[in-house]
Image: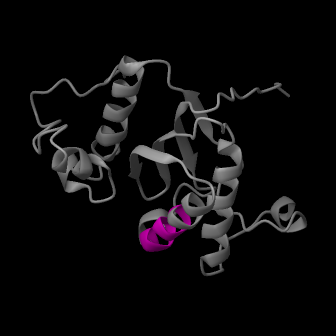
């Protein structure tokens, strides 16, 4: 087994990808209000800034900035995932290993995190987040996906409503 090490920097900005255990499910958008409440509840107790975020049916991407004296993003993710799972109606399939540990089986145990290095890195991850619903074929235009901070970026004048439309290079470093 690989010895995976996370980077903990108080006050840092991180990019995350968090997935459902069953990627065929659509729990995150089916229960979007519950997910929003989980975030609100945990942010009240363990503050952090959501710089950018998109919620898709089976996974989400987010950029968070933590308080200056705090690097404990694992606690926040554990609490968000737990709160959402406990408040979600039961009925999902669970493997015996999850049953033995008393886990619901809603989320993948691991998630991806990346320490954002600089403004360019930040901008590329924000673009990636906002483009993701188009990338996955959920919508043809970024503005048509309702579960994204893209709308906040437009409201605040950071992006235009037609950002990412045909003609823009929206590959964001990915291979097409």
Q: Is residue 78 left or right of residue 17?
A: right
In front of the other: 97 or 43: 43
The N terminus, quarter of image? top right
Give me the residue at 70% from left, 54% from top.
Answer: 78
Q: Position of residue 130 (x, y in %)?
A: 31, 41
User: In front here: 152 or 87?
Assistant: 152
Identify the residue at image location x=41%, y=54%: 56
| Magenta stretch, overall SS | helix
98 relative to 10 in the view: left or right? right
Q: Residue at x 78, y 65 (%)?
A: 103
Residue 60 against residue 115 in the figure, above or below = below
- Residue 174 position, x and y percent, is 37, 22
Tell me what residue is drawn at x 48 percent, y 63 percent. Answer: 28
**Quadrant location of residue 111?**
top right
Residue ranking furthest to the front = 69
- Relative height, residue 25 to residue 19 (above, below): below
Give the magenta range: 31-39
Q: Does the stretch in magenta take in 33?
A: yes
* Relative horizontal placement of residue 45, taking residue 125 as reference (left or right): right
Residue 42, position in %: x, y?
60, 61
Q: How is the image coloured?
A: one colour
Residue 46 versus residue 163: which sits nearer the camera?
A: 46
Q: At which x and y percent is residue 139?
A: 23, 52
Identity of the residue furthest to the right in this view = 100
User: Exactly how many numbered labels are in the figure?
Assistant: 0
């Amino acid at each position: 087994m690989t010895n995976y090490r996370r980077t903990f920097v108080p006050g840092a900005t991180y990019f995350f990808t968090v997935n459902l255990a069953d990627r065929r499910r659509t729990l995150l958008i089916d229960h979007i209000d519950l997910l929003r409440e989980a975030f609100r509840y945990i942010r009240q107790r363990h503050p952090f800034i959501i710089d950018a975020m998109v919620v898709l049916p089976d996974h989400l991407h987010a950029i968070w900035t933590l308080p200056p004296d705090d690097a404990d993003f694992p606690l926040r993710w554990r609490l968000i995932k737990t709160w959402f799972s406990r408040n979600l109606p039961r009925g999902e399939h669970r493997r015996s290993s999850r049953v033995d540990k008393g886990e619901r089986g809603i989320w993948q145990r691991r998630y991806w995190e990346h320490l954002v290095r600089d403004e360019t890195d930040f901008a590329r991850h924000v673009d990636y987040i906002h483009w993701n619903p188009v990338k996955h074929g959920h919508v043809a235009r970024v503005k048509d996906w309702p579960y994204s901070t893209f709308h906040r970026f437009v409201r605040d004048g950071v992006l235009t409503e037609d950002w990412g439309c045909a003609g823009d290079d929206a590959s964001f470093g990915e291979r097409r």
